Amino acid sequence: MDIKITLKKKVKLKDPYLICGLPGIGHVGKVTIDYLIRELKAILFGEVYSHFFPSYVIINKDGIVELMKNELYFWKDKKFKHDLILFTGNTQAVSPEGQFIIAEEVLNTLLTFGVKKLYSIAAYVSDKPVEIPRVYGAATDSILIEEMKVHGVLPMGNGSIGGTNGLIFGLAKTKDLHGICLLGETRGYQTPSGHTVVDVKAARAVLNVLTQMLGIPVDMAPIESQVDQTSEFITRLAEAESLMLRQIQSTTSENFSRYIS
Amino acid sequence: MSKNIWVNHIRKPKLNEPIAIVGSPGLRSIGKLTIDYLVKKLQAKLIAELYSTHFPLIFHTKPSYASHPRLLGDAGVSIRESEIAFPRIQFHSSTFPDLLITNGYHANFNGQYAVAEKVLDLFEEYNVKKMIVLAGHGRTGNEICCAATNLQLIQEMKEEYGLEVEYQGSFYGFSGLVFGLAKLRRIESICLFGRTEPNSGEAEYPDENAVNVILKYLSRILKINL
């Protein structure tokens, strides 16, 4: 099995929108989807396993082994005319081939639920520390770009969206789906050991826009406290980065003057 | 992918729901050394060997169990006492209790999951219902801890053998994948992690002490003298 999609429940969904966000830079996509799942009390209905995922498993806090996987949740609201399918996971495929196959197969499966529109959540990497993250966007057509602007989203213009979060958005267009990609601005810090620093602030910025666009009621209070917890850590990283840059600059100018003399 | 993996059956013993014991070269070689000891001590019989075009002889990743899609390694054979040997996974059997002892090997990125699935196929052929995975971890804590495929097993390990859950995090390579995929196939599995000091220069440098600790607990769990 290159990919195995297991649907646990038979669900009928009304004109569902697909919202995707896999782990990536700053975990912006994953944090956004995880938050929606938690706050909306979305229900797990499918799991995606693949040989293209990294070759390790996770032992969780209870000592239970978990394979790397992607998950599909649904949310129904009688007041809302579009149900939601939420797609996230604890990993994404690590090769381009795997990312293509997973994005394609997941989309094909979800098309059978009547998905006509998707929102993919990703990160917009800034080259300097970000105090108030902006939300950038790209869309499959110009009408959607205008719609995004109304919600304060800055059109991305030129750039690239790497990984499955970008691919699934690109493939949506080839399948005549309406697609929007929202990118939360982040510095994209990593720890010295190469682990991604979770940027909750960027995810909050995306959530503010996304919930407005979807018109869904989501309590934002819990994420505010998470922002407070992570902001301090990111501020320290930004300060360390700034200090390092100053040191590099001073060393460079010192060497340069020595060279001139 | 699976056409690149094949099993040579050497003999087909009659085993009654054997417990699969799994280990592979990994952190401080704890899993592999324990399996080597078990095979020797129990005079287990070689019953099958699994080969794959995804088994490098020379790994381009360091340690070997950290696979990467662009670092697939080099194939080759090893020579031991003038005998040619391909990289392989070996399955041995022993009785009282019936065991299927598996000496694993790390496939490269292209074959890692498929090889683990093939191993589990063989376990199912032998009607394996329970599995014990042997490995190491490099964090602080007790000399041994455990993980499992369900909470009931965790509780059982705690009550009967005093084993605690301590290690949280990733479990790389062959043994980790067999453990994770076994859960999907509903093979009840536990993993014993012997604590070790990671060796940054050579991750797989043997740790005999951790092996002895695992053997002590394994002996109690299997109710055999090791």
Image (cartoon, rainbow, N blue to C red):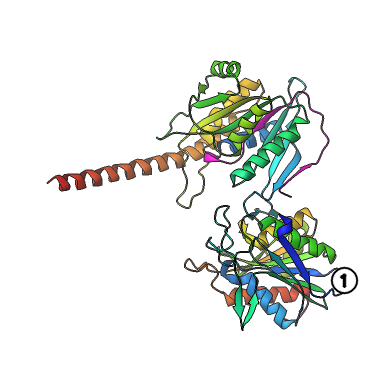
Q: Position of residue B183 (x, y in %)?
A: 76, 55
- Specify whether residue A9 is painted magenta: yes
**Residue B149 can be seen in this image:** no
Res. A80 image quadrant? top right
Res. A216 image quadrant? top right
Q: How many numbered marks does the figure carry?
A: 1
Say which chain tag 1 marks: B
Q: Position of residue A231 (x, y in %)?
A: 47, 37
Q: Position of residue A233 (x, y in %)?
A: 46, 42
Q: Say left or right for A250 vs A205.
A: left
Residue drawn 37% across the image and 41% down it: A239
Q: Tell me if residue A208 comes above or below residue A260 in the rendering.
A: above
Q: Which is more toward the observer, B37 or A171? A: A171
Q: Tell me if residue B51 comes above or below residue A247 in the rendering.
A: below
Instruction: Indicate the quadrant containing the N terminus of chain B: top left, top right, bottom left or bottom right.
Output: bottom right
Instruction: Indicate the quadrant containing the C terminus of chain B: top left, top right, bottom left or bottom right.
Output: bottom right
Q: Tell me if residue A212 comes above or below residue B158 in the rendering.
A: above
Instruction: Give the residue pinned by disc 1.
Output: B16
Q: Residues within 10 Å of mark 1 (few under 14, many from 20)?
A: few
First to last magenta residue range: A1-27
**Residue B71 can be seen in this image:** yes
Q: Tell me if residue B68 comes above or below residue A141 in the rendering.
A: below
Q: Say left or right for B26 vs B20.
A: left
- Specify whether residue A142 is painted magenta: no
Residue drawn 58% across the image and 17% down it: A142
Res. A86 image quadrant? top right
The amino acid marked with disc number 1 is Asn
Q: SS for tag 1?
A: loop
